[in-house]
Amino acid sequence: MKKTYFNKILVDPEIMIGKPVFKGTRIPVYIVLDLIGDGISEGKILKIYPDLTKGDIKAAIKFASLMMDRRVLYETA
């Protein structure tokens, strides 16, 4: 089952084994979150991944927050 978050992040079992990616790319969200966690600036991330936008990076942070919300983690489909 495909699911889109914030119109920027796609979870599709047929793309990257279902890992969340930025819509229209095969760039996994976790890579950008790792870079942010390592202190890499937004500008540098955008240079590394020119297909991404500032909005994509913000969506990644919002997505991480959403996934950490216990209500979502235990929600059943």
Image (cartoon, grey):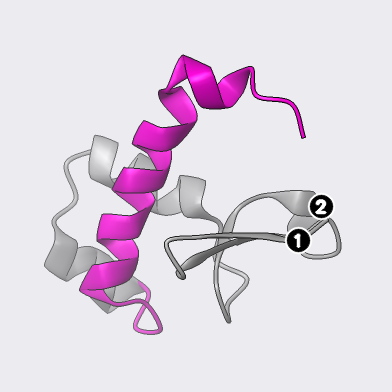
Per the picture, the main secondary structure of the magenta-coloured stretch is helix
**Front position in the image: 4 or 18:** 4
**Front position in the image: 24 or 4:** 4
Q: Amino acid at mark 1?
A: Lys
Q: Quick one: SS at disc 1?
A: loop
Residue 73 position in % (x across, y down): 58, 22
Q: Earlier in the sequence, mark 2 or mark 1?
A: 1
Q: Disc 2 marks which residue? A: 17
Residue 30 position in % (x across, y down): 49, 45
Q: Residues within 10 Å of mark 2 (few under 14, many from 20)?
A: few
CA gap, disc 2 and disc 1: 12 Å
Residue 50 falls in image quadrant: bottom left
Residue 41 falls in image quadrant: bottom left
Q: State how many labels appear.
A: 2
**Front position in the image: 55 or 16:** 55
Residue 27 position in % (x across, y down): 55, 66
Q: Residues within 10 Å of mark 1 (few under 14, many from 20)?
A: few
Between marks 2 and 1 in the image, the one whose residue lies nearer the viewer: 1
Whether residue 74 appears in magenta in the rendering, the answer is yes
Q: Which label was assigned to residue 2?
A: 1
Q: Amino acid at mark 2?
A: Ile
Q: Quick one: SS at disc 2?
A: helix
Whether residue 56 appears in magenta in the rendering, the answer is yes
Q: Which label was assigned to residue 35?
A: none
* Residue 41 to residue 36: above or below: below
Q: Which residues are magenta?
A: 49-77
